[in-house]
């Protein structure tokens, strides 16, 4: 029978059958091994979270570029302003203070701004 190993973010490995493993695998890339206990490194988890925001916001920014161009063509000042505001919110999303202040995975997941980014992939 083959042994299954878990590898943490630093390349350390442990026999999976002997480890205490977090139940949430969203931030597996942030796992850190301490003896036989695996926990999430919050700094690495925040980086993963921000990368997910960037992944999700790209098509939203692309779509908003189209909205802005249509507003520009129609010379619709209020639509241009709304589009600029939405694009700024999307650009600022990875820098949200809730992300920086999160000290648990639950708080980090709760930092997903659904009003800007849509449904959370962590729900």
Image (cartoon, helix red, strand yellow):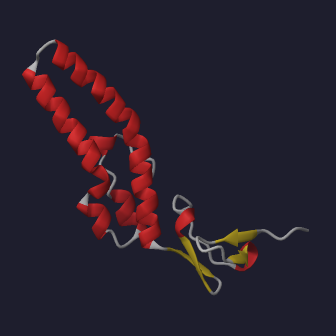
Write down the quadrant of residue 32 in the picture: bottom right
Placement of 114 over or under 78, stated as above or below: below
Write down the quadrant of residue 10 in the picture: bottom right
**Is any atom of residue 123 visible in this view?**
no
In the rendered view, does 60 fall on the left or right side of 71?
A: right
**Is any atom of residue 107 visible in this view?**
yes
- As drawn, which residue projects farthest toward the left? 77
Placement of 35 over or under 108, stated as above or below: below
Residue located 15% across and 12% down the image: 74
The image position of residue 18, as x and y in percent, is 72, 80
80 or 106: which is nearer to us?
80
In the rendered view, does 43 fall on the left or right side of 33?
A: left
Residue located 75% across and 71% down the image: 5
Residue located 72% across and 73% down the image: 16
109 or 83: which is nearer to us?
83
Placement of 100 over or under 69, stated as above or below: below
- As drawn, which residue projects farthest toward the right? 1
The image position of residue 102, as x and y in percent, is 33, 68
Write down the quadrant of residue 72 in the picture: top left
């Amino acid at each position: 029978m083959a042994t299954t190993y878990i590898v943490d973010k630093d390349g350390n490995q442990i026999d999976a059958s002997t480890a205490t493993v977090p139940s949430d695998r969203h931030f597996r890339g942030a796992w850190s091994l301490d003896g036989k206990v695996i926990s999430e490194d919050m700094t690495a988890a925040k980086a993963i979270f921000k990368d997910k925001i960037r992944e999700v916001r790209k098509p939203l920014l692309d779509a908003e570029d189209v909205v802005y161009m249509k507003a520009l063509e129609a010379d619709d000042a209020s639509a241009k302003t709304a589009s600029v505001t939405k694009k700024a919110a999307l650009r600022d999303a990875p820098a949200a203070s809730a992300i920086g202040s999160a000290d648990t995975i639950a708080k980090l997941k709760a930092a997903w701004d659904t009003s800007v980014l849509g449904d959370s992939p962590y729900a």
